[in-house]
Image: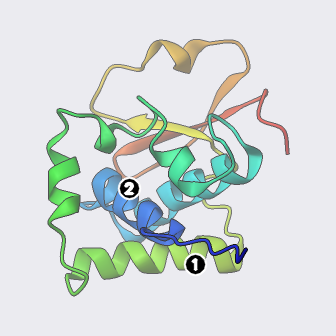
Amino acid sequence: MLDVTLELVPPSAWAILTICQEAAGESDDGKLAVAEVIRDRTLLRYQSDGTVAGTVLKPYQFSGWNTRDPARLMSARLSIASPVFGACARAWARACAEKTTLAKGAVLYHAAHIEAPAWASASGIRLVTTIGAHLFYTDASAER
């Protein structure tokens, strides 16, 4: 029997759509930092099954995929020709090809305009940088 694996949605599409949801209004650095978090979570299997889809679609990890988040529908309607899509695609490609470290190894982040979530003060969590409108954190439990 022939083993054929069909990817209806390639891993890069899940990453790019998530970057669009989370950082569409951010600078290129802001988009790149979010891309790095997705990349690193996937590679480390941090809140992830080791796939990009399993990383970004894990419940309550990337708010853009939450049912009531308006960014979810926005990303579904996004044109591949849009400048935002292009910028997010470039951020993902760069994070993967260049192994960038702008986010300083962060595996967590949240928008600066919200009150810090409970996880931000948990043991082993450390704020490492602020880029644009996001605060980025490492977690000592994330194995490198």
Q: Nearer the viewer, mark 1 or mark 2?
A: 2
Q: Position of residue 77 (x, y in %)?
A: 14, 66
Q: Which residue lies furthest to the front in this view?
A: 1
Coloration mode: rainbow
Taking 23 as reference, is 11 left or right? right
Taking 44 as reference, is 79 left or right? left
Residue displayed at 64% across by 73% down: 96
* Residues packed near mark 1 inside 10 Å, few (<14), some (14 to 19) or many (20 plus): some
82 lies above or below 31? below
Quarter of the image with the N terminus in it:
bottom right
Q: Give the residue at mark 1.
A: 94
Q: Image quarter for residue 136?
A: top right
Secondary structure category for the residue under label 1 = helix
Q: Image quarter for residue 31?
A: bottom left
- Give the number of callouts: 2
- Compare marks 1 and 2 and give the one earlier in the sequence: 2
**Disc 1, disc 2: CB below 8 Å?**
no
* Residues packed near mark 2 inside 10 Å, few (<14), some (14 to 19) or many (20 plus): many
Q: Residue furthest right?
A: 144
Distance Cα–Cα, label 1 vs label 2? 15 Å
Q: Image quarter for residue 123?
A: top right
Residue displayed at 42% across by 77% down: 89
Amino acid type of the residue that numbered disc 1 sits on in the rendered structure? Arg
Amino acid type of the residue that numbered disc 2 sits on in the rendered structure? Thr
Residue displayed at 43% across by 18% down: 117
Secondary structure category for the residue under label 2 = helix
Q: Position of residue 61 (x, y in %)?
A: 46, 34
Q: Where is residue 15 in the image (x, y as percent from the top left)?
A: 46, 62
Q: Residue 18 carries which label?
A: 2
